[in-house]
Image (cartoon, grey):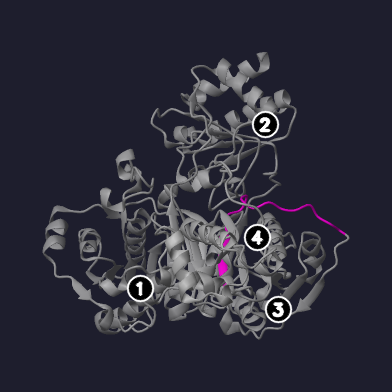
Amino acid sequence: MSDYIVLVKQVPDVSQITDNAFDPETGTLVRSRLANVINELDAQALGFAHYMKQISGDAKARIVALTMGPPMAEEVLRYSLARAADQVVLLTDRSLGGADTWATANPLAYAIRRIVKEILHCGDDYFVVAGMQSVDGDTAQVPGQIAEELQLPCIAYATGAEYKKKRFEFTRIISGGSQTVATRKMPAVITVAKYEYPLFATFAGTRWGNKADLVKWGADDINATHIGAKGSKTAVIRVFPPGKSTRKCQEVKDAGSLAKVIVESFKSSNGGGGKADEGPGPYVLPARRKSLLERPYEATKKEQDDYDILSGILKEMKVSDVKQLDDATKDKIVEKAGGAFHKKALDDMIAGLNLADPAFQGEVWVVAEHSGDGVIHPATFELTGKARELADSLETKVGVCIAGDNVAHMAEELIAAGADHIYAIEHKLLKEFDPTAYRKAVSDAIDKYVPQIVLYAATPQGRMLAPMVSYKTGCGLTADCTGLDIRDSSRKGDIGLLLQTRPALGGNVMATIRTKNSKSQMATARPGVMKRIPADPKRKGKVIKHKVELADDDISLDVIRTELGSGEVNFGAEAIVSGGKGMQSRDSFDRLLHILCSELGKKLETEVEFGASRAAVEQGFVERVHQVGQTGTAVGPKLYVAIGISGAIQHMIGVANTETIVAINSDPNAPIFKQCDYYIVGTAEDVIPELVQALENA
């Protein structure tokens, strides 16, 4: 029978963030001011592993909890011992600090190898179980990258497990539905998206957990190949507070007033859309600027300010060719700069002024996502539009890599959306999405054509595939980007870098990241954030068929059952009404959403679609095809009405581009009230009938 290695992580408690947690001068979050807790999804993963052990009927199966972090991270290991773990391992070393997901997955994988060999002695009969993601990063990359390092199958977004005929069958979330799968071979990596049966510590378990000896390993004990900042493939170059929200967060006291603001805001289309826009115009390569001395697109404010100062001094001194500067002239420049930079920094800046060629070469690629019946995911078109913008700035081509059984016929639609080249990978074994087979196919194409940028949609499929491809190709990856821009870091010798901006710590901070030590820059981007460009049926492009060798051994999963939502869902509608777990029952969900959608459609004279939170889907209120959010569909209507939805970050991510958000919730402290435009406190049963009546009379 199988043993279990559960990955757990100590994270800041982002649910308890107050104004005191932020630096008053910089506006950034100070992590040391927050309490540390076990990552909630990792706690659920521990429960999931314990459940697997129970249903397998193997009382001798062992659970080992593994964490990487500072010495105080032993707290989450003792938490694990008090509940289900039989043994724990703390991987701690100062040299491991500052790691990105690449340099986190690598040492964890090496630690797993040692656990299997020296602690479990279990050969290939084990599972690595982890939470889908951690709240401090929200990347969902580490488990997939561990699977790639260990060459294991990976089942992501698991929500349930059954034990049948001496093997486990897992239910997992896929785009538009769910799927039941089993691994063809062992061991395997499982990431848990939801497990609602938490483990509780017993008194005896807590005493034992507090007294038990921990296994502690340092970097030298595992001999990993990529650790810490030096082994990372990405680097954070800027951390800053999120842009000021333009949401009104205005409480409405009665249904009549709510009906009035809904109608008025819809007709005025002035809800705000969440965040204020920021950033300069389109990037221009140095060779296309009036002068190589112009450096208006530097990556950080400090670099930009220094170059602005230098440019002004050079103009004042009438210097047009920096190659002719002698030491005396440089000393004068440093003096005129008034301490803004020293001579060594000036030398680096001058060297940067002589650069014109981009640090990366090649096309800008999008890895397409599609259904088996030939329907391309909307996010692919959004990314193709963004790729067109980036490629035009870099004066290169846009490529779309699409894999499947029969996909070349989709090329025309992709070319019309902005692509120049379609890299079609066709093979009968690619008919169903299998992460291992698709990883091999896409990686093979990237290795051959070496694009400088590769973009994936941050869908369940994209967030599973991208980490595996990035690790196999040796490239850095940034998850869930909301901003992608080309900028320079001239003084560091880099021109035309892709700067990748994303939220972290539950959206409480923003980080701008660059790729390093990689042949391609890779990122996933949230659906609904980038804009699709208008289709041009007259555009011409080229289809390039890429052959890949696949065998049955490349298929890692047996697909037992796929359940997709029936009927059509139009999340492009101007108004969407979504229900959550707070609606209490399927009957209330169906009845109340139907009457509200119907009345809104009449009053606003527009189509109104209905959606749901993940909790509502998992309660069985509605099919998964209606799910809105990070693991569902991102939407951006003129009006979004959320009923009985708490406002979890994963849901709000999916509605961030909405113009006006209206919330109805019985909890006066619901987080969604701080992320919407208008809200009313009350139950759906009380508010919706009154709101429908008010809309009729408005």
Whole-percent x, y for residue 372 in the image: 70, 64
Residue designated by label 1: 228
Task: Tell me the crowding category of disc 2: few under 14, some 14 to 19, or many 20 or more residues within 10 angstroms, Cα based.
Answer: some
Left/right placement of residue 67 relative to residue 517 reads left
The local secondary structure at tag 4 comes to loop
Cα–Cα span, label 2 and label 4: 30 Å
Select label 1 or label 3 by which is in front: 1
Task: Locate the N terminus and report the quarter of the image it occupies.
Answer: bottom left
Residue designated by label 2: 269
Magenta stretch: residue 389 in it? no
Residue designated by label 4: 283
Q: Quadrant of residue 398?
A: bottom right
> Badges 1 and 2: C-beta atoms under 8 Å apart?
no
| Whether residue 192 can be seen here | no
Three-letter code for the amino acid on which mark 3 is drawn:
His
Three-letter code for the amino acid on which mark 4 is drawn:
Tyr
Q: Looking at the image, which residue sits at the far top? A: 697
Whole-percent x, y for residue 648 in the image: 45, 43
The local secondary structure at tag 3 comes to loop
Cα–Cα span, label 3 and label 2: 47 Å
The local secondary structure at tag 2 comes to loop
Left/right placement of residue 440 relative to residue 16 reads right
Of callouts 1 and 2, the N-terminal one: 1
Of callouts 3 and 4, the N-terminal one: 4
- Stretch of the chain drawn in magenta: 520-537
